[in-house]
């Protein structure tokens, strides 16, 4: 896959997002049993971008902030610590019942007790993301972007964010920027907006070079016909995903990469983790391997981040999915929702199963 038409780019990766914080009990406790919590900055899209930013590629975040909010200050400092440049409008809070950054309240689970997630998004400032607040001509034409990564979470957040993602995709295509689209279907976001969002998602998917999602994502976001056979084991999931993607790409012939992760949960801290990718006419599969999980949230984003990093680096396609598998596995070993690779060597050691001490 060739990335764009230019020789020079200011940004390797650009992501639009709605930033928030995650509140997590300490010591793997359940939320309702806890008295002590830790708070982390989070968003699915910056989880993806963290792989590239920690490994030295220039990343830009398009978002919006609540003016003079201490949570906004925390978010800005966190993005800077992740080596990300951010751009976004400052929105007045409008009093105690006005705008705020979203709260994600989630535990990690432990052993037989699975994790539980509670999203509190009332008054979310990210829903105000508007195309008029950004100079897209400057971003794509003058500065240059190798890959624009879009998420269905942002594309479905509000009518304003839907239009924002659509306009970003159109401008990216106009200027030769590659587009990655993680479908990320959420039923609560789509309620009473099914027709509108279906049209938006199909247009973005039609512009995308890389599509990521599970069977449900492709069926519910794009109206894709499901596979003929189903099953609960991972082998049958691989076959059914391949069947479906072969049908999907007839409608989205411009897309050159389709990918998904595979996960079988043995218990909260022990998973089988794999991945599938169609690149051109070539299938690449990482057979599920056992991983130990500290916190599963962010593993899928870590996979996408590693996949995009491999593409940006110009590696052979088989290495894209291998690196993505390993960065996804790395994300499950930390309490932040995003992985923080020390270097490429650390990631390849995970892929090779080498957990020996490095001195």
Image: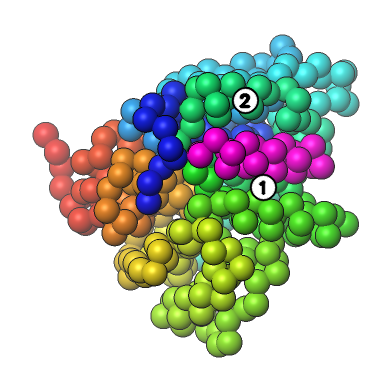
308 drawn magenta = no
Q: In this image, 274 relative to 348: left or right?
A: right
Determine which quarter of the picture holds residue 224: bottom right
Q: In which quarter of the image is the C terminus?
A: top left
Across the whole image, how many numbered discs are drawn on residues? 2
Q: Which secondary structure, mark 1?
A: helix
Question: Of helix, strand and loop, which mostly describes the magenta segment?
Answer: helix
Of all residues, the one furthest to the left in this rendering is: 359
Q: Which secondary structure, mark 2?
A: helix
Q: Is residue 323 shown above or below 89? A: below
> Residue at position x 79%, y 37% from top?
160
> Residue at position x 26%, y 35% from top?
343
Q: In this image, 319 relative to 9: left or right?
A: left
Q: Tell me if residue 233 can be seen.
A: no
**Residue 137: mark in rendering:** 2
Give the image location of residue 327, x and y in percent.
36, 48
Magenta segment, which residues?
Answer: 158-177
Q: As rendered, which of 205 and 70 lies closer to the eye?
A: 205
Q: As rendered, which of 64 and 12 lies closer to the eye?
A: 12
Give the image location of residue 225, x and y in percent.
65, 77
Give the image location of residue 52, x and y in percent.
39, 35
Determine which quarter of the picture holds residue 57: top left
> Residue at position x 55%, y 87% from top?
229
**Residue 153: mark in rendering:** 1
């Amino acid at each position: 896959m060739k990335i764009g038409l230019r020789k020079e780019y200011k940004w390797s990766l650009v992501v639009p997002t709605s930033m928030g914080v995650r509140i997590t009990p300490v010591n793997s406790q359940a939320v309702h049993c806890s008295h002590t919590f830790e708070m982390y900055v989070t968003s699915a899209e910056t989880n993806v971008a963290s792989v590239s930013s920690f490994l030295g590629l220039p990343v830009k975040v398009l978002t919006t902030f609540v003016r003079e909010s201490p949570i906004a200050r925390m978010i800005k400092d966190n993005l800077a610590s992740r080596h990300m440049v951010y751009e976004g409008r400052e929105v007045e809070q409008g009093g105690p019942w006005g705008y705020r950054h979203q709260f994600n309240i989630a535990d990690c689970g432990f052993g037989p007790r699975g994790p539980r997630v509670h999203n509190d998004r009332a008054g979310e400032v990210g829903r105000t993301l508007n195309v008029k607040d950004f100079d897209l001509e400057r971003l794509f034409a003058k500065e240059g972007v190798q890959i624009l990564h879009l998420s269905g979470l942002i594309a479905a957040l509000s009518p304003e964010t839907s239009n924002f993602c659509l306009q970003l995709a159109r401008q990216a295509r106009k200027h030769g920027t590659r587009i990655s689209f993680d479908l990320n279907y959420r039923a609560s976001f789509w309620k009473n907006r099914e027709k509108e969002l279906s049209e938006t998602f199909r247009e973005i998917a039609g512009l995308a070079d890389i599509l990521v999602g599970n069977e449900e994502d492709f069926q519910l976001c794009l109206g894709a016909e499901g596979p003929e056979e189903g099953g609960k084991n991972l082998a049958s999931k691989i076959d059914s995903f391949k069947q479906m993607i072969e049908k999907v790409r007839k409608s989205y012939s411009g897309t050159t990469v389709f990918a998904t992760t595979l996960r079988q949960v043995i218990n909260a801290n022990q998973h089988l983790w794999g991945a599938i990718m169609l690149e051109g006419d070539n299938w690449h599969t990482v057979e599920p391997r056992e991983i130990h999980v500290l916190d599963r949230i962010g593993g899928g984003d870590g996979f996408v981040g590693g996949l995009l990093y491999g593409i940006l680096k110009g590696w052979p396609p088989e290495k894209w999915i291998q690196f993505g598998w390993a960065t996804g596995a790395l994300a499950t070993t930390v309490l932040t929702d995003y992985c923080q690779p020390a270097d490429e060597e650390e990631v390849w050691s995970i892929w090779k199963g080498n957990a020996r001490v490095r001195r």
